[in-house]
Image: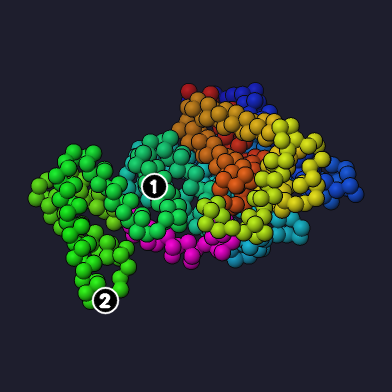
Amino acid sequence: MQRRINTWANLDWLTVALYLLLVFLGWINIYAAVYNDEHQSILDFSMRYGKQLIWISAALLLAFAVMTIDINFYSYFAYIIYGALMLVLVAVLIFGKEVNGATSWFQVGSFRVQPSEFAKIATALAIARYLSTFNIKINTVKSYFRLAGIILFPALLIFLQNDTGSALVYFAFILVLYREGISESILLIGFFIIVLFILALVLSKLTILLLSISIVLIIFWFLNRSFKNIGIGVIIISGLTALIFGINELLKLGLPFYYVLLVALTISSIVYIYFSIKYKLKNIVLLLIFLLSSIAFTYSVDYVFNNFLGRHQQKRINVVLGLESDPYGVEYNVNQSKIAIGSGGLTGKGFLKGTQTKFDFVPEQSTDFIFCTIGEEWGFVGTFFVIVIFVFLLYRLIGIAERQRSPFSRIYGYGVVTVIFFHVAINIGMTIGLVPVIGIPLPFISYGGSSLWAFTILLFIFLRLDASRLELL
């Protein structure tokens, strides 16, 4: 049974106020970022701040349109919307225009639109539709594969556009699955893979191999509480290592010690599986699979890093990890951004008085690096204020998600939260040098129509669902 509810009366106006405040802050900081003495009017439509006002006006119209659509539309047509956006992502690979090395834009005259921004909405809707379907069990192999397909398919298409930053955003949806009951082990495995990837770039393979063996031995002790069995394992691998090392030296094969230890570990794993079956030891097979998989992954990191990432992406990662220095290349943007933010001090230099901003020392300062403009002109107080607004917005959205009666609305709401959170955390992190520069905008603040429109639609679909939550009895 349903009853009609006044949508506008039940709209969460506090969230709308936070949205409008962020959009306004974005507009005036875009004005500051590209300010020109010859174009002083903030309504000059030949400048970015004038164009942003057009995008803002269109975004407000889109928000109004979203609020007038029946709530059932978003659930019933979720898969169709998702499929249509996937076709658009394929089309942009064929007919798209290359901008900054990424073929991810459609251009008609001077107007450009980036479909990958809108694909996040479609993905959030598709996940919500699937997980809210009656009798769906999330912790099954079938559900894992279907959810992985929904999330990874658009990420792959966007990766093929050479827009790695936008592709990475889709992995944030894993947090939605965690809220809906996915096993904690999936998150732990994901976290371990990220850590192992970083360690594989920083440490030698031999060091990681020894570290992996040590970790598995510690886990084994916690599971079995037996130093005797650990001792047997250490003796087996040590003996085989000594034997293979001797053969390597005797026959002058020239194998590095890492490979000697790897062969010894593989043989000893087979031997130890026999002992585990004979003496009924717990989880040995799983631990050995974990160990060998970790080693195989470590060995593959170099290949993936060198063959799937562009040279500029490799440099950005190496710079963050301290493995490479390129102050006049990939480091330049971040260094100038940190100078701008640091020079702002406590209260900033004042509106339109930022020297780093005014003299264009920071590239992309109205888009990806808009946060450094805030830092320079408004100082620590200004940046803290912006971060607090985002935190409050996310906290508010989580509260709204938890009060939903419909599983579809709740799941979609968490999709909105994770996408905004990922963008905010990574964008601010890259402007202060904590994460590699991957080129994603700061929600509602960075210059650009596609980004602003997509985030507006993403947010207001959720607010529309929330406004009608009481219709369900």
Depth check: give the residue in front, 467 or 215.
215
Q: Is residue 295 magenta?
A: yes
Q: Quadrant of residue 4?
A: top right
104 or 382, nearer to the observer: 382
Say which of 85 and 280 sits in front: 280
Q: Is residue 116 left or right of residue 272?
A: right
In the figure, 205 relative to 347: above or below? below
Q: Quadrant of residue 444?
A: top right
First of labels 1, 2 by sequence position: 1
- Based on the picture, tell me whether residue 60 belongs to the magenta stretch: no
Q: Residues within 10 Å of mark 2 (few under 14, many from 20)?
A: few
Image position, residue 24 (x, y; %):
74, 35
Rendering coords of residue 206 (x, y %): 34, 59
Q: Residue furthest right?
A: 38
In this picture, is 129 found above or below 464? below
Please name the amino acid that badge 1 sits on: Phe
Task: Describe the colour scheme in one phrase.
Answer: rainbow
Residue occupied by mark 2 = 252
The residue positioned 74% from the left and 32% from the top of the image is 347
Horizontally, residue 429 falls left or right of residue 152, namely right
> Does residue 382 appear anywhere in the picture?
no
Range drawn in magenta? 294-318
The residue drawn where x is 39% and y is 47% is: 192
Q: Which mark is residue 339?
A: none
- Mark toward the viewer: 1 or 2: 2
How would you classify the magenta stretch by its main secondary structure? helix
Q: Residue at x 24, y 49 (%)?
A: 286
Give the residue number, with chain letter if any, for mark 1.
Answer: 192
Helix or strand or loop: what does disc 1 sit on? helix
- Give the CA distance from mark 1 to mark 2: 37 Å
The amino acid type found where label 2 is placed reads: Lys
